[in-house]
Amino acid sequence: MTISGEKNIADLQSRVHELENQLNSLKKSHEDAIGYIRDKINQLLHVMGTLPLKPEELDDKTLIQLDPIGIIAESFAQILRHHRKTNEELALARDELAAILDSTGAGILVVDRERRLQAFNPRARDLLCHAGTCWEGDPIGQDFHAVICPPQETLETCIFTKVLATRQVAEQIDSFRKNNYLQVIGSPILTETGDVKLVVLAYIDVTERLQTEEALRESENRHKLLSAQLKAVFDGIKDPLFLIDKDKTIILKNEAADEMMSGSPQPEGISICDAMLPGDDPCQESGIIDECFRTKSPQGMRWISPQDRSIDVQIFPVESGFGTVSHAVVAMKDVTDQVLLQEETLRASQLAALGELAAGVAHEINNPINGIINYAQILVNISAADSRTAEVADRILHEGDRIADIVTHLLNFARPDKNKRVPVPIKELFDNALALIGTMLTKDSIRYHVDIEPNLPPVLCNPQKTEQVLLNLLTNARYALNEKYVGPADNKKITMSAKRTDGGTLCIQVRDEGTGISELNLARIFTPFFSTKPAGKGTGLGLSISKRIIEELDGTLKIDSKQGDYTCVTIELPAYRAGQR
Amino acid sequence: MSVTRETICIDIRGQICPAALLMALKATNEHKISLEQGRLCLEILTDNRDATVTIPEAVRNMGYNVDVQKAARHYRIVIF
């Protein structure tokens, strides 16, 4: 080997050594690079929330092929894009929320658990400051305890404390100063673990509403009181009153109206005409209700009810405030008794005048009749006993006596002392009545028969009034018989009887076999002004007055009748006991 | 009106978590446009329990919906 060959070998060895060193250096560098890559991949995986890669899981070659950094970088790009989008949406939502908060009528505060203000809207500042709980400067982050809770804070008084404790929505009325009321609704915002993170407080000024409600309540109470007073007054009026609308529907009625309608319970909202006047509709016929609504002036009428009662009906308009008549008050007053009294007064005054006239005539007749009787007696005295003159004079004497008798009865009947009760033999009552009407009965071929039980005590009565009743009954009997029989007939008769009852009273009966009375008319026989006689023949007052006279004398008057057959009037009066006045 | 989605199934059973997550993310990245347009859903089959937490969390952060279902011997993670 040459020196140059040896040198070359040495150079090569040196070069190999150098290359080995370079290779080792490169290997080290490669391992460092792979280690760095694995380290960074693990760092990224950690950020992704997962475990580090184990070398045995992926060899270096597969690792490079898989390109985890590229994958994660791309994923991060997507994450960033998604977050950007989310942020944009959140920003928009925040702006929307801010706009809603600013434009809402409610004042809104958002406070954290430590009562530090996190958000608010301008309305909250205005409302709370007006309510007396103001703040100054930048309030965000400030302790708002004094603003949201009253000085004496309790679970009941501070809504914030309540929401914090219950973790539920709460609502109450806060008043920080007199005559100012805030309705506040507290809502919790909870963390994932269910703790209260924030409390949202929404305030609404309800001062005006509460004051209005209070005023309304007071007005309602006043209205109720007024209504009760009105009802008391309404019901206190003893005549039927109705409030009706334009359709004549009953809106309101008093107790007297209820009584008037009782016996036929009426549903609500019925027409006054249907309720009051079945089958007989004066308000429709007369049209006075319509007239009242039309003319806006009160209307009135006298109405004879189906029960023959005289009712004064007055209709008063109720104006609605817009110049129209919305309702009407119908006032009814039963004036039957008043009308009856007027009729009776008139009749009594007529009778009194007639009585005075009769008494005057009777007195005037007494003088000439005494003369006639005296002259007749002279004729009797001077005539031969069986002569024609004596017979005629005797008849004159007899008839003259009869005239004198009638005149005496007339005078007695017209005597003004009509209220005194005295014991009177029943026969005397019958005789006196017959003395006035007997001739007329005979003239009409009516036979009459008097049947008085022996040893009857006198009846305790007012003879004039009782005779008036008997005269009335006999007049009715005569009318009924004349209606049934034009001429004489076997049954054309009246029976007058008197007997003692089991109860110790005296029973007087007047019975005729005349036309009788139908059942329908019998039910109405004592109704004043009810009469079956043609106009001018009867007033319809006779029986009603007779019944009243007998009842005033503590007696009773009843009528039994069969149509076409008979009529029997029974009067019971107290008997006179010795010493009784 | 619901759009019928195409389903691509990726079976990474046998892979443990970091690799499983990387496989799932790789597939999601590859199909991100179809996923965002709602035309596709990815069905990942895995038997690694950790992956049922890491994969859904990662893809949710990326803005996708995830549904994890338990099958007999593995899990189905549906990304849509």
Image (spheres, coloured by chain):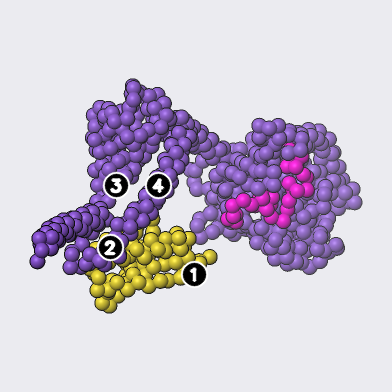
Chain colours: A purple, B yellow
Residue A345: x, y in percent?
A: 70, 36
Residue range of the region highlighted in magenta in the rendering: A264-292
| Residue nearest the observer in this picture, A375 or A407 | A407
Frontmost of labels 2 and 4 is 2
Looking at the rendered structure, the kind of residue marked 4 is Arg
Quarter of the figure that contains the N terminus of chain A: bottom left
Residue B3 placed where, x, y %?
50, 67
Say which residue label 4 marks. A84
First in sequence, mark 2 or 4: give its number.
2
Mark 4 / mark 3, whichever is N-terminal? 4
Q: Are marks 2 and 4 on the same chain?
A: yes
Q: Which residue is mark 1?
A: B4
Q: CA distance from mark 1 to mark 4?
A: 29 Å
Instruction: Give residue A38's position: percent from left, percent from top.
Output: 21, 58
Q: Using a 10 Å C-alpha cutoff, classify the residue at mark 1 as few (fewer than 14 neighbours), some (14 to 19) or many (20 or more).
A: few
- Quarter of the image for residue A22 reads bottom left
Label 2 vs label 3: CA separation? 47 Å
Of all chains, the one bearing label 1 is B
**Amino acid type for the residue under numbered disc 3:** Leu
State if disc 3 and disc 4 touch (CB < 8 Å): no
Q: CA distance from mark 2 to mark 4?
A: 31 Å
Q: Nearer the viewer, mark 3 or mark 1?
A: 1
Amino acid type of the residue that numbered disc 1 sits on in the rendered structure: Thr
Q: Residues within 10 Å of mark 3 (few under 14, many from 20)?
A: some
- Kindly state the secondary structure of the residue where label 3 is placed: strand
Q: Which residue is mark 3?
A: A190
Q: Which residue is mark 2?
A: A64
- Quick one: SS at disc 1? loop
User: Up-down: is B43 above or below A207?
Assistant: below
Q: CA distance from mark 2 to mark 1?
A: 37 Å
> Can see residue A546?
no
Q: Which residue is at 78% across, 68% downward?
A: A490
